[in-house]
Amino acid sequence: MTRAPLNAVRDTIRTQLWPLPVAAVAVALVLGVAVPRADHGIDSSLPSWVSAVLFSGDPGAARTVLDAVSSSLITVTSLTFSLTVVTLQLASSQFSPRLLRTFTSDVFVQATLGLFLATFTFSLTVLRSVRSAGDAQSVFVPRIAVTLSFVLAVASVLGLVVFLAHLARQIRVETMLRDVHDDASATIGAVLGQRDPSSTAQVETQLSPPAAAHTVLARSSGFLVRVDENDLLRCAVDEDIYFVLYCQAGASVVAGTPIGSLWSAARPLDRAELKLLEDRIAGAIHIGFERTAVQDVGYGLRQLTDVANKALSPGINDPTTAVHALGHISAVLCELADRDLGPVLVHGSDGQVRVMLSRPDLADLVEGAITQPRRYGASDPQVMARIFRLLEELAWHVPARERNVITSHLERLKVTVKAGDFDGAETQQLAQAAEDVVTALARQALRDA
């Protein structure tokens, strides 16, 4: 399995609440059967100091302990699930529905639920192995298993306390924005390489579909989750064709609409060949019902921008959170500016470009990140000043060929400020912020000279 499918599987498992708890239940079930059996075989040969710390009650006491642990832990688990659901509802309504993946991927929450469910399952399974004097078989108390159940119960109590503290920290906007920022940085590092100073030459080698190229249609609706470059390249080389994908990871596609073009420079392609090629291409293009961070470098920015937009809505009216989100947006954009953006050219072993995949450039990412906050925060001087500051920070990272992105947004931001209702002091402050962007661009140009 190649790296991209592995990352997709890992992301799918990581963002689900159930895999880790289910695994913990399975392990607890096995231990609940195995530990009493081992207990039966080694109980009589244990050292005295070990026996002194093990459970020493009769079958009735053992059943009481195991019953108390199992019944209380299922109640605690229900409480934990309820608190988790409340947190998810708060994140969705207060910040953004797209943050739910961030909360469900919290390993600490998954591990806590796993601990509670494992303790319940283990205690309930061990309970069936306790035998009293009235039973058909001899009296048996699995002392090691009952002691382990008690230890797990104590660990669960401590886990509940730590879980509550963790949950209180997780619903803070600072923690939430940091987690989204970290996920975005991880995706950028996994998908994008460092910017190549000579990458301008690559633009000249981009594939351009001829007029007779065959249009490839999407077979399902949803979001483009990931693309297997190796599979597409193998198909292109095997069949001696060229392929251009129009959609980028995270884009919405509709079944029956064009997503790419394929053609052969050596021969015309008949209907049977086109059907085979479409099948192979469809197998390499994965469409899902939601955006993910597997290959979507703009997904983290979308989440951060959503938080800023929500904070600037009349119902929330929290410009401080919007400014905080813009700070993270600026950091992610600066990181993206130092990466290799734009179309992906996939070369065959002979060095010839066979496949071209669409990927956002810096202009697309900046447009999606700050246009909505600029509109929704047009009446707040702090928000406007922070967007000016964002452009200034980004100016120190963009290459010379991308500086028009900064100047374009700077002019649009000036127009927004001019149309706003600001007093004299605020207008002067924002004018100085705009001048700082121009100064940063000029100084960066001198550094590159």
Image (cartoon, rainbow, N blue to C red):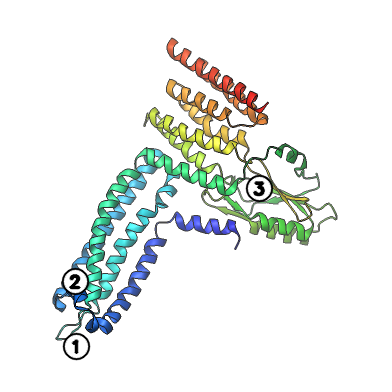
The image shows residue 268, relative to residue 204, as above or below, that is below
Q: Residue at x 39, y 54 (%)?
A: 107
Name the amino acid, label 1.
Ser
Of label 2 and label 1, which has the lower sequence position?
2
Helix, strand or loop at label 3? It is: loop
433 sits left or right of 112 in the view: right
Q: CA distance from mark 3 to mark 1?
A: 73 Å
Of label 2 and label 3, which has the lower sequence position?
2
Mark 3 or 1, which is nearer the eye?
Answer: 1
Q: CA distance from mark 2 to mark 3?
A: 70 Å
Name the amino acid, label 2.
Val
Of label 3 and label 1, which has the lower sequence position?
1
In the rendered image, is residue 423 in sight?
A: no
- The answer to which image quadrant residue 42 occupies is bottom left
- The answer to which image quadrant residue 145 occupies is bottom left
User: Is the N terminus in the top left, top right, bottom left or bottom right quadrant?
Assistant: bottom right
Q: Dot 2 corresponds to which residue?
A: 53
The image shows residue 396, relative to residue 222, as above or below, that is above
Name the amino acid, label 3.
Thr
Q: CA distance from mark 2 to mark 1?
A: 24 Å
Mark 3: give few (<14), some (14-19) or many (20+) Cα within 10 Å.
some
Mark 2: give few (<14), some (14-19) or many (20+) Cα within 10 Å.
few
